[in-house]
Image (cartoon, grey):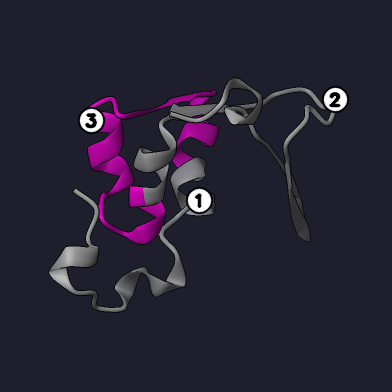
Amino acid sequence: GVPARERNWWMVLKPDEVDICDDDPGHGIDATVSGSLRDLVTIWRGDRSWTDALRTEHVQIMAPAPLRRLIPVWFGPSKFAAVPRKEADLVA
């Protein structure tokens, strides 16, 4: 449900910084994560685990095995995911 121009983002990871780019920054691509914005947000919010999202194929990671294992560590739930929320606030 995201316009084509806004569907792809690039995350550039360096030892001391992370940059999110709307346009291809021109670096080689080591890993690709595919999924809907909604599914990625449910992981970030802590409503769904990476394990569940990958098992159900709502999210896919295309990368060598060492990177596939690290992406869920790098892109884990927000520190606010542990804050209790009202049932109405949870994403189904």
The quadrant of the picture occupied by the N terminus is: top left
- Three-letter amino acid code at the position of disc 1: Phe
| Badge 3 vs badge 2, beta-carbon distance below 8 Å | no
In the picture of the structure, the residue carrying the numbered disc 2 is 26
Q: Secondary structure at mark 1?
A: loop
Residue at image position (85%, 25%) is 26
In the picture of the structure, the residue carrying the numbered disc 1 is 75
Horizontal side, residue 30 vs residue 54: left or right:
right
**Distance (Cα) linking label 3 and label 1:** 17 Å
User: Which stretch appears magenta?
Assistant: 42-69
Q: Secondary structure at mark 2?
A: loop
Residue 45 is situated, as x and y percent measured from the top left of the image, at 36, 59
Residue 89: quarter of image: bottom left
- Three-letter amino acid code at the position of disc 3: Arg
Horizontal side, residue 79 vs residue 57: left or right:
right
Which of discs 3 and 2 lies nearer the camera? The answer is: 2
Q: Residues within 10 Å of mark 1 (few under 14, many from 20)?
A: few
Q: Residues within 10 Å of mark 3 (few under 14, many from 20)?
A: few
In the picture of the structure, the residue carrying the numbered disc 3 is 55
